[in-house]
Image: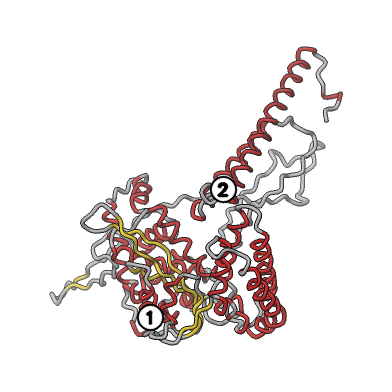
Amino acid sequence: MLDAADLPDDIAALKAMLIAAQAREVRKDERIERLEKLVAAFKQAAFGRKSEKADPEQFDLALEDLETAMAAIHAEDEADSPPVKQHPKPRVANRGSLPAHLPRIEQIIEPESLICACGGGLHCIGEDVSERLDVVPAQFQVIVTRRPKYACRSCTDGVAQAQAPARLIHGGLPTEATIAHVLVSKYADHLPLYRQAQIMSRQGIDLDRSTLADWVGRPAFELRPVFDALLADLKRSTKLFMDETRAPVLNPGSRKTKTGYFWALARDDRPWDGGAPPAVAFTYAPGRAGHHAERILQGFTGILQVDGYAGYNRLIAPDRVSSDIRLAYCWAHARRKLVEITRNGSAPIAEESVKRIGELYRIEAELRGLDAEARQAGRQARSAPLIADMRVWLGHHRARVAGKSPLGEALADIAKYWDGLCIFLGDGRIEIDNNTVERTIRPIALNRKNTLFAGHDTGAENWATIASLIETCKLNSVDPQAYLTATLTAIVNGHRQSQIDVLMPWNYSRRTNG
């Protein structure tokens, strides 16, 4: 509120102030309207009809744009606000925190004079400290290696010279750190090689995309034994997750693409405090048929948690060739179909089903982090009675719903996979859903969105190899850039195949500290 003492005595100045205030009010109303439209757009992207809302791969990008627009409007609002004598309460915002490991560059800003108005000297009684995040843009440098040659003045027995250090690409320009940077940029940050070439050109480094492709293909070949060891380690587990996602690949001889698939095999025992490190391995296959899953899983025995895709039924068929596998199914997929039905109109049965499944998830949230025995005991005491009641309830309502209706089909799917949906009750290691592996597969989907397709089956296999190591690094809180640099350097220097397990991403910290 304005103070009368702040108002000018001059009538013309007072009129100008009133006109400016009125204009600010108009602009404020316009900004409110714009914010309301942004909120409506956000709701449409998140909760609109399936044909209108953003798919999961685009949602984060849409959300970024909405948040950016809102920030710009807030800045405009702050710029138009009249100055106030007292500091207003800052807008609540999550600005993040600055990690302790980042280097600190201190700057001390002293007053212009340390002499008091009375003539005495000022002494320090405290200080205000603030931190801001700064950045030094990625800068390339040239490593110049000189190897002096030495000869004896007294004889001609030869020349002494140190051996040249090993290189991943013989006679090539990049260090192993540079190669790792290209790999991480492509497979973790989703920057296609032609965009990386454009970024490099801004620093005067002119490289063809084909050159960068060579820098990707060669390490992919060298890293294959590490990937094979990762996949073998996963298959020694007794409980895994599996999922698959499309991998459009250019069909040689035509200008069209064919649809291959990345099959993700994942392990995450952290929810029940298991000892095995989290990991994921992607395997490329030219199709989605169940025999691809059977081939990938050869040698694995135990619990496999999957969604309701029928191709996995081959793994439990009576004439199966694979080892003994039990399938645990996903309550998230069962719930997803019911949620879609509730969004299309009034659906009391679907709504009640969603509510009942939600109760199971609330119990799971409270049990997460306990050991397997405690989780199993909690499920038997709390979830098992709810599921027993749900089975009777679903059976009763299935008889009242048309079998070919969306709700009838959703309830039929739950009944079809009922035994596999209930396996988690008797084993605390099993999750209630397959979301663990779905989270690991999202970066593949985003990379697919940016690059459209792999150029060849071999390119897709390279993609799977490198993405597996990068995503496993992320699961273990390991910096992929540092890991790939160290691992490629170790391989170049002749790391023994018999000790390949040392190169697993979860052993990186031990390697660097030991």
Q: Is residue 513 visible?
A: no
First reached walking from the N terminus: tag 2 or tag 1 = 2
**Type of amino acid under label 1:** Ile
- Badge 2 marks a residue whose secondary structure is helix
Q: Which mark is residue 70?
A: none
Judging depth in this view, the residue of 223 and 131 nearest the camera is 223
Give the image quarter of residue 27: top right
- Badge 1 marks a residue whose secondary structure is helix
Determine the CA span between mark 2 and mark 1: 46 Å
Looking at the image, residue 33 sits to the left or right of residue 473; the answer is right
- Residue reaching furthest to the left: 156
> Quarter of the image containing the N terminus?
top right
Judging depth in this view, the residue of 497 and 342 nearest the camera is 342
Looking at the image, residue 49 sits to the left or right of residue 8; the answer is left
Looking at the image, residue 436 sits to the left or right of residue 352; the answer is left
**Type of amino acid under label 2:** Ala
Q: Residue at x 63, y 81 (%)?
A: 425
Sort mark 1 into few (<14), some (14-19) or many (20+) by Cα contacts within 10 Å: some
Q: Is residue 297 visible?
A: yes
Coordinates of residue 320 in the picture (x, y in percent)? 39, 84
Give the image quarter of residue 288: bottom left
Coordinates of residue 127 in the picture (x, y in percent)? 73, 50
Coordinates of residue 81 in the picture (x, y in percent)? 71, 31
Residue occupied by mark 2: 45
Q: Judge whether 334 appears above or below 322 on screen.
A: above
Q: Residue at x 23, y 71 (%)?
A: 161
Give the image quarter of residue 228: bottom left
Q: Judge whether 82 appears above or below 130 on screen.
A: above
Coordinates of residue 512 in the picture (x, y in percent)? 47, 74
Residue occupied by mark 1: 500
Judging depth in this view, the residue of 66 and 4 nearest the camera is 66
